[in-house]
Amino acid sequence: MSIGRRWPLFAVLLVGATAVASSASIASARTTCRLTLSYAGSTAGTGDVFARFDVVDAGRGSCQLGRYPHLIFRSSSHRRLRTSTAYGSLAETPGRKVTALSSGASAYFLVVFRPLRDGGQRCNPSAATVSLAIAGHVAATARLPQNLDKFREPINPCAGGIEVGRFAPGR
């Protein structure tokens, strides 16, 4: 298929997967944006888990992120988990925000959720993967831990309730 210079063609191509993260390319006639997503870790406090996700532009072109991450969680049987998403508040990070990444740049965002019911029982199911969607297309997917680990908590929000913060500059 040929592409005229006047009309860039955007396509999402799955380019790889690892045990932790995968990436996809959003290609145009001039640049290539390739995002990777990884679950950096989590910490807990006051009954909530604060999970950090890192995003890196590993491509040759810049990537438009938008204001807030749009996330799709899937179970180990690949079924989409129902979530009710709130934006901001507990998941917001201080300082400036990022809406685009240049080649090699990184950003991060927080996801806050409550993993335990009243009485201390863990909520189910846990998400096996999370996908970051940009402009309606899956841009990157990361595998999530299924076992308790004090540095990387499984993502198992009670009643599907999650709070997502805006993209912030990475380190």
Image (cartoon, helix red, strand yellow):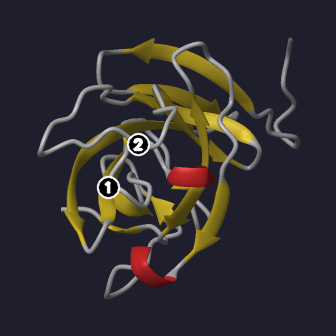
Q: Amino acid at mark 1?
A: Ala
Q: Is residue 8 left or right of residue 67?
A: right
Residue drawn at point x = 64 percent, y = 34 percent: 138
Residue 74, image quadrant: top right
Residue 155's disc number: 2
**111 vs 135, nearest the viewer:** 111
The quadrant in which the N terminus is found is top right
The residue pinned by badge 1 equals 51
- Residue ranking furthest to the front: 119
Residue 13 image position (x, y, % from top left): 63, 20
The quadrant in which the C terminus is found is bottom left
Residue 129 image position (x, y, % from top left): 48, 28
Q: Is residue 148 left or right of residue 90?
A: left
Compared with residue 24, is residue 136 higher up or lower down, i.e. above or below? below
Residue drawn at point x = 58 percent, y = 66 percent: 68
Q: Secondary structure at mark 1?
A: strand
**167 vs 62, nearest the viewer:** 167
**Front disc: 1 or 2:** 2
Whether label 1 touches label 2, CB < 8 Å: yes
